[in-house]
Amino acid sequence: MATPANENNALLPQHVAVVMDGNGRWAKKRLLPRTAGHKAGVDATRRLVELSVKKGVRYLTIFAFSSENWNRPAHEVSSLMALFVSTLNAEVDKLDAQGVRIRFIGDRSRFASNLQDGIAAAERTTATNTRLCLNVAVNYGGRWDIVNAVREFANRLIDGLIEVADINEQSLGDALSLAGMPDPDLFIRTGGEQRISNFLLWQVAYTELFFTDALWPDFDEAAYDQALRWYASRQRRFGKTGEQVESGHVARVR
């Protein structure tokens, strides 16, 4: 068994964000259809949630379906939507039993009514849980998130509810999808790509970025511990010098 990465909780990230990449390539390597990779990816996601609860992570945000994913072949999108519905129905009670609160961020309007109903029901069922907040980004994009906040401010300005001077970093952050939560401390992307891909663009301004070649279905406890240990080794300066951080004993986790 891998060595636990939470021996010192002061070095454990409060909030982990994950881009789960590589399902299709995992399936291709095994001469399987892409749908098989997505199903294996569901198992990896379940494992990640369970490990996050076990290790004491408080917030976990996963990129399940981006606003750009609609550009994939229609049959793959249809398969992903069906898998999403079945997974949601199968997992909600398990998440609830683990003390996990599930929230969905993104534009739900494009989803079928049964999926929208399932999303709302899952949020209601788990609303009072506090052990882990699981944010699932579906039909989400970081630019969409910021534009939505700007539109909200524009409407409030037109209605005379605020003044231009009321718009600042704090108020804009409070209008985004993850309002009320700490920004991600650790960003993990699997699959070998090294980019953000329009995920939490505002929120990852000072996040530590960890990229791994592991394909998402292969991301296991050892891989997670590797990312957590790497995070624990980082000195988070937030604009300060290394000497200031060391002399002031500034915590690595906000």
Image (cartoon, grey):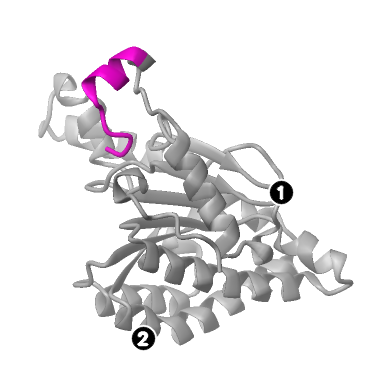
User: Is residue 241 part of the magenta span, yes or no?
Assistant: no
Residue 121: image location, x then y, percent: 32, 79
Left of 102 or right of it: where is 190?
A: right
Residue 51: image location, x then y, percent: 45, 67
The image shows residue 137, relative to residue 176, as above or below, that is below
For the residues marked 1 and 2, what is the alpha-carbon distance in whole angstroms? 33 Å
Left of 188 or right of it: where is 169?
A: left
Left of 4 or right of it: where is 218?
A: right
- The quarter in which the C terminus is drawn is top left
Q: Residues within 10 Å of mark 2 (few under 14, many from 20)?
A: some
The image shows residue 74, relative to residue 254, as above or below, that is below
Amino acid type at image mark 2: Asp
Residue 110: image location, x then y, percent: 50, 63
Residue 198: image location, x then y, percent: 54, 40
Write down the residue under mark 1. 213
Q: Residue furthest right?
A: 31
Q: Secondary structure at mark 2?
A: helix
The image shows residue 189, relative to residue 59, as above or below, that is above
- The quarter in which the N terminus is drawn is bottom right
User: Is residue 247 part of the magenta span, yes or no?
Assistant: yes
The image shows residue 46, relative to residue 7, as above or below, that is below
Say whether residue 198 is visible: yes
Say whether residue 197 is visible: no
Chain part drawn in magenta: 243-254
Tag 2 or tag 1, which sits nearer the N-term? 2
Disc nearest the viewer among 1 and 2: 1
Write down the residue under mark 2. 93
Q: Residues within 10 Å of mark 1 (few under 14, many from 20)?
A: some
The residue shown at (10%, 34%) is: 161
**In terms of image quadrants, where is residue 151?**
top left
